Image (cartoon, grey):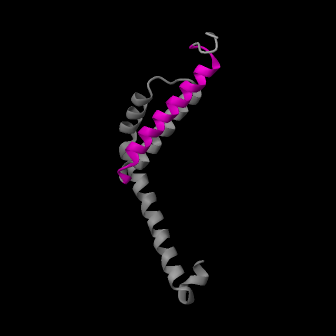
Amino acid sequence: MGKFFGLDTRVSRFFGMVWNLLVLNFFTLLFCIPVVTAGASLTAMHYVLLKLVRGEESYISRMFWKSFRENLKKSTILWVAFLALLISYRVDWVIAVNNPEVLGKPVL
């Protein structure tokens, strides 16, 4: 019975991975709260996930924070551009739906 709950068993590694993913999702959601930093947060999450898959993990919070700081400027610029594009598409959609006789049919 002690072997089932040991530190080197598959059960222990599985629950360790589940815990790591929960912590990673918590950090990602926390850093996505200011919408402007969502791009950097998602970039850091993908960096940590890549390290987890390759088996190069250490401390989840340190890896996340390191990647967040390194990619903040680049990913924020890209995220703001993407967000502007999404807002533009949403405005076009609302205009097309509200004016079906004029613009709605060709746009939809």
Q: Who's the residue at 53% across and 23% down the image?
A: 56
Establish if 5 lies above or below 99.
Answer: above
Q: Position of residue 39 (x, y in %)?
A: 43, 48
Quadrant for the C terminus in the image: bottom right
Is residue 30 or residue 82 the one in the foreground? Answer: 30
Residue that protrudes farthest toward the front in the picture: 1
Establish if 74 lies above or below 19.
Answer: below
Tally of numbered discs: 0
Q: Position of residue 45 (x, y in %)?
A: 48, 39
Quadrant for the N terminus in the image: top right
Is residue 74 or residue 63 the one in the foreground? Answer: 63
Q: What's drawn in magenta, residue-wise?
A: 7-35
Is 90 contained in the magenta span? no
Is 12 contained in the magenta span? yes
Residue that protrudes farthest toward the top in the picture: 2
Residue that protrudes farthest toward the bottom in the picture: 101
Is residue 58 or residue 3 the one in the foreground? Answer: 3
Q: Who's the residue at 58% across and 78% down the image?
A: 107
Q: Position of residue 32 (x, y in %)?
A: 40, 47
Which SS type dominates the magenta stretch?
Answer: helix
Establish if 33 lies above or below 3.
Answer: below
